[in-house]
Amino acid sequence: MSNEIVKKEDTQLQERKPTASERFTNMVVNEFQGNIGQLNLNEYQKQLIRNYFIGIDNALKIAETSRSYNKKKANDPTVTWDNVNMNKLAVDVVQNAKMGLDMSIANHLHVVPFKNGKTNKYDLTLMPGYEGLKYIAANFALYKVADIKVELVHENDVFQPTYKNNIEGYEFKITNPFSRGNVIGGFGYIRYENEVHNKLIVMSVDELLKRKPSTASPEFWGGQKDKWEDGKKVGTEEIEGWTNEMLYKTMVRATCKKVTVDPKKVNDSYIYVMESNENYYIENQEEKVQEEIDENANKALIDIETGKIEDTENASNEEVSENDNTTEGPAF
């Protein structure tokens, strides 16, 4: 009887089908090796890739919902796995996993999908969020980083840079947390284990706003936005946006750039991820959401935060687990 039970269990194990995330991981490895070369991933990196599948699958669903409600995009292909440029995605997934970026951690890694007018498919780019940038900066620093702190300074706060015993520092106090006033600047503080290397970066609000893209989306930065009714432009409207959040992200980016990188730690994955991040920020204005890019390419940004995905207008949040029957994976 016991032998029959053992045989039955062995048969069940053999019949077990891989999950969608496991098929995705295998596809990524095969796609990467077929176009780039031999690939060796450890178990942690493979787990990160499995997490990426869940986040990306959610992102596609949110983007498709947005597309279906946008009359301008009625003729665009559906935002599904069948219409994704898998070759580019495989490279992005591998390089970010090798960097240790985790899509399940808030603001570690974002999915940026956009339609490629030449291929009529969707290119998905994985972009580090501000927590991801701090993580990279700390891990690739020449000197051991203890902490990277970033704050916006409001007009009712008290902020004073200090310099004592050859160590840069600061004094910061929020005197009225419920009425801090307007933002007047920001600071970033890189604290090293050897405090002699500590670095304070200070920027006024004008300096931060200089880094605001010339075509920045009012959904993020606030300001006037075109108003549409029945597919026709009927004027403009003023929206509040998320100006302080954008200023904070700008301060994080400026601070992380001041961390001295250890050249011995720089590898192909670091170069790929950082160059992709910088190129996207410069060429596509990072947080910009615009309906048309050139003739045919559309872009939308989706934030992934700890199992939740939020579209560009914070319209909906959705939690999806690997066991969710509604998760519709690609035919890997």
Image (spheres, rainbow, N blue to C red):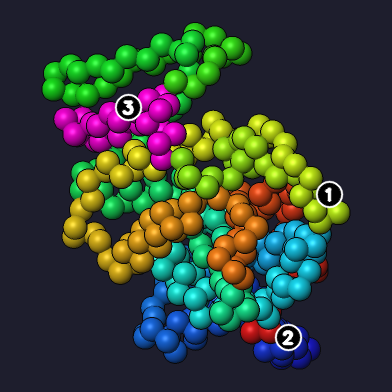
Query: Which one is earlier in the sequence, the residue at label 2 or at label 3?
Result: 2
Is the residue under label 3 in contact with that under label 2 (CB below 8 Å)?
Answer: no
Taking the image as shown, residue 165 lies to the left or right of residue 289, namely: left
On residue 12, the disc is 2
Residue tagged by mark 3? 202
Q: Viewer-nearest of labels 2 and 1?
A: 1
Q: Quadrant of the C terminus?
A: bottom right
> Total label count?
3
In the displayed orientation, state which residue is furthest to the left. 166
Distance in Å between CA atoms under marks 2 and 1: 57 Å
> Residue 5, percent across and down?
75, 86
Residue tagged by mark 1? 229
Asked which quadrant contains residue 3, the reply is: bottom right
From which residue to which does the magenta span run?
185-211
For label 2, the SS is helix
Residue depicted at x 56% and y 33%:
243
